[in-house]
Amino acid sequence: MATPEATAMIGAAQLNQDTVGLEIASPGDGGFDMNWWPVALSGEVGPEQIIDRHFLGGDVVIWRTASGLAQVSTAYCAHLGAHLGEGRVVGETIECAFHNWCFGQDGNCRYIPAPHDHIPASAKIFGYPTAEKWGIIWAFNGDVPSYEVPSPPFVNADSYDILADHAGGSDIAPFYAPISNIFDLQHFEFVHRFPGAVLSPDNLPDRPELDIGPHHMAYRQTMGGGVFGHLKVWGTNGLTATYIDEETRVITEIFVFATAPRPNGTGFDAYQVLFRRKKNDSPEDRAKGRAQLEKAWAAQLYVASQDDVVLRRPHFRMRNFTKADRWLKQFIEYVRDYPRADPGGSFQ
Ligand code: FES
Ligand SMILES: [Fe+2]
């Protein structure tokens, strides 16, 4: 039989379905979202170098094998737990500084130098599925990736110059807050002064529906102001955007944006990649491209500074959605229900 307290709670839940139904667990509670998370810029990990970072509630090493492959692995040696950040790269393995056990990219111990010794079956660290794309090293939080690293459509990497860098963050706002922005159509007008009427899913010209899959949410839509946008969220932390001039059909802007939670689980760090189509392979064009990308980066920073005003110190809550917030609510529900895991947790 339900206790009076339980009855009262059920009553509150029924009265406040939006409030109670849209609570999102904090990162680490039940694991972390099974995303491709950005962990470092490619340029931060040199040839055969090891750096260490805090990642999803634990410590990892990010290292580059002799053949140049980047790898994100849990940081503590499977033997007596020395931090592998004190070790070195040996061929395609990372070697512990303490007794020189060597671990491969898959996390398995490959070599124990002590004579007549054998490798215990459980001598493993966790090797996150790791990818290097768009100048960023990404780690997938799971045993096997369930989707691709965020990649803008229509982009053949060889035809573009890119600029990838850290792009600020917040001490307070959750990692999905800046991603939720693209479904918060009204803020395009109120925060960014996007020209045109107040945007909501209901007054967009042809009332598009969201494309929602297990690991993405996307829409393609005339945004007003002569701009057509193709925006897609990958997992719960990645975003690709392509903007096209409606009149000329020329792509005016492409970017990749991704966030990761800060060490204590609150706030986030952001990474961003901008793209510029190459004209040719000459040094002149490369220099011109670099200048254009830096200018575009400054423009993006300006847009981000507008968001920063509202993301700097919110008590982020998901309640009192109106009809115009329909897409935003769908995104919050998607984040709430997104699968979580912590495959590296038991190796800490
Ligand atoms: S602690 Fe790493 S080899 Fe012993
Ligand atoms: Fe914004």
Image (cartoon, helix red, strand yellow):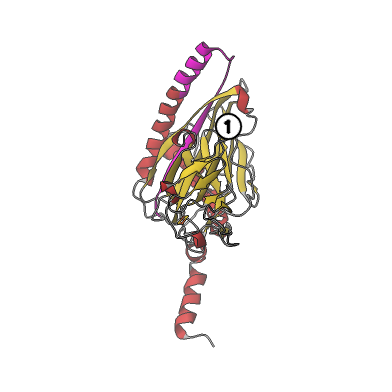
Residue 138, given in percent of the width and then of the height, sits at: 53, 43
User: Farthest front residue?
Assistant: 115
Point out the stretch of residues depicted in magenta.
Answer: 266-293
Residue 228, given in percent of the width and then of the height, sits at: 59, 31
Give the residue at x 51% y 66%.
17
Residue indicated by mark 1: 242
Ligand 2 position by quadrant: top left
Image quadrant assignment for residue 120: bottom right
Give the residue at x 64% y 27%.
156
Q: Secondary structure at mark 1?
A: strand
331 to 67, vertically: above or below: below
The amino acid type found where label 1 is placed reads Thr
Residue 70, given in percent of the width and then of the height, sits at: 54, 40
89 to 154, vertically: above or below: below
Is residue 205 a member of the stretch shown in magenta?
no
247 to 69, vertically: above or below: above
Residue 54, given in percent of the width and then of the height, sits at: 42, 50
2 to 151, vertically: above or below: below
Q: Nearer the viewer, residue 112 or 87?
A: 112
Give the residue at x 59% y 41%.
149
Q: Locate the N terminus and report the quarter of the image it occupies.
A: bottom right
Give the residue at x 44% y 28%.
297
Q: Nearer the viewer, residue 97 or 255?
A: 97
Q: Nearer the viewer, residue 39 or 80?
A: 80
